[in-house]
Amino acid sequence: MDSTELADAESLLPLVYDELRRLAAAKLANEQPGQTLQATALVHEAYLRLVNGRTGQIWQGRRHFFCAAAEAMRRILIEAARRKKSLKRGGGNERVGLDAATMITPPTTGDLEAISEAVAKLEEISPERAELV
């Protein structure tokens, strides 16, 4: 991007910001609860993609620009949803409250006795290993 294109991009944002913000708010209103992306961040990310994505992009009018902005916002929201659901980030896991987690924890009274007996048997065979355990 040369200095002329950069200046054009910088002068474009104040002219379209309010409308992009409304568009972003409308897109986010259709999202499921728990969406952490805010309208302002969505506008900025979409604008950066529009301006930096293609060097020498020529808009064929206001409608063309806003259609491209809407498409960029849609893609950003899809990418965010995919990241959120990915297994790497725990997307397949279900949140469990602390009370529910303690209810499903099995009692450990018998386990302590079994461990103590096993350590006693190990001590007879190898006192050093038993001490380590």
Image (tube, grey):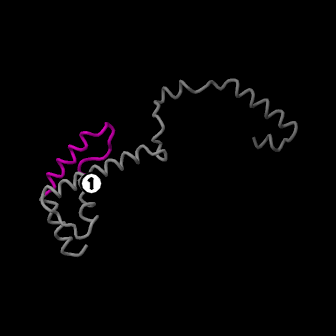
The N terminus - image quarter: bottom left
Q: Is residue 31 magenta?
A: yes
Question: How far from the left and from the top, in percent, is residue 83?
Answer: 41, 48
Is residue 111 positioned above or below 36 on the image? Answer: above
Residue that appears at 27% across and 47% down:
38
Residue farthest right in this picture: 125
- Main SS, magenta region, reads helix
What's under tag 1, amino acid-wise?
A: Ala
Is residue 90 positioned above or below 52 on the image? Answer: above
Q: Provide the residue designation for mark 1.
A: 72
The C terminus - image quarter: top right
Residue that appears at 26% across and 56% down:
46
Residue that appears at 67% across and 24% down:
109
Q: Looking at the image, how many numbered discs can be counted on the residues? A: 1
Residue 45: name its quadrant: bottom left
Residue bounds of the magenta highlight: 16-40
